[in-house]
Image (cartoon, helix red, strand yellow):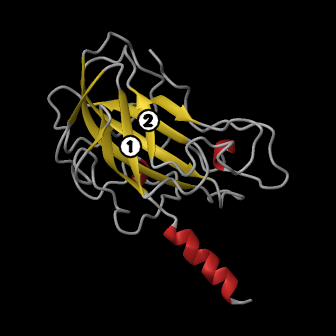
Amino acid sequence: MKLLPVLALSGAAQAHYHFSKLVINGKAEAAEWTSIRMTKNYQSNAGVTSVGSPDMRCYQLRAGTATATVAAGDTLGFLAVSSITHFGPVQFYAARVPDGANVNTWEAAGNVWFKIGSISAVPPLGSTESTWPAYNKEQVDVVIPKAMPSGKYLIRVESIALHQAQSVGGAQIYLSCAQIEVTDGGSGTPGPLVAFPGAYRANDPGLIWSYYPVATSYTAPGPAVWTG
């Protein structure tokens, strides 16, 4: 009996994941960490647990090395290794790289991020795939808004794992940042703009989950999605 908690913890550790490849025009990048900045969890697969940590920005271990080209209005996919094995929302943010800045080293600090997608809960609430469409998926997608101006961007994907979020600080955030250049863009003004860290607080309702009683509604943390 005493072995059960150890086995459970071991299984939870093995269930961690990271996002390391883009899917562009239906084709996955051949190698990990091509257009995505290598993250600190590339071996451990551990998530970020402090929303006040600078790791909430890109969780990166090193600077970027390449930039993918994506047309506004096209779909951009992220592959999870090996899949998204914890339930919770998956969200996407973008930050435009200033003209003249190096996309490989730009830190995206301050209020520069805007949300472009959210795969959140579908009622009735529970802890299965019927509530969480991204749960157990190997790939999650976001459409680059047609009105998004052309230029270089960081695209930040985050999976907020709620399986241990019964108390403040229990949520685990699995995230990474891709480097892309948007072509054929529009003339929209993205917003609202937020910062990482700063956009979330540890006690945000969207970072806490109750198995019993189960809530009747759920709202993912952060600003509204900008659709253009």
x and y percent of residue 44 in the render?
Answer: 40, 69
Residue type at mark 2: give it: Asp
- Give the camera-side residue of 166 and 124: 124
Q: Secondary structure at mark 2?
A: strand
x and y percent of residue 12 in the render?
Answer: 57, 69
- Relative to 226, does residue 50 appear above or below in the rendering? below
- For residue 141, which numbered disc appears in the image? 2
Q: Label 2 crowding class (10 Å Cα cut-off): few <14, some 14-19, many 20+?
A: many
User: Which residue is farthest top?
Assistant: 187
Which one is earlier in the sequence, the residue at label 2 or at label 1?
1
According to the image, label 1 marks what residue?
78
User: Residue at image x 34%, y 40%?
Assistant: 109
Q: Are marks 2 and 1 in contact (CB under 8 Å)?
A: yes
User: Which residue is farthest front?
Assistant: 26
x and y percent of residue 143 in the render?
Answer: 41, 26
Can residue 199 be seen? Answer: no
- Give the camera-side residue of 47 and 126: 126
Total numbered labels placed on residues in the image:
2
Q: Secondary structure at mark 1?
A: strand
Residue type at mark 1: give it: Phe
- Name the quadrant containing residue 76: top left
User: Which quarter of the image is occupied by the N terminus?
Assistant: bottom right
- For residue 7, which numbered disc appears in the image? none
Can residue 205 be seen? Answer: yes
User: Residue at image x 38%, y 38%?
Assistant: 77
**Distance from label 2 to label 1 (Cα)?**
6 Å
> In the image, is 61 to the left or to the right of 7?
left
User: Residue at image x 38%, y 25%?
Assistant: 144
x and y percent of residue 6 in the render?
Answer: 62, 83
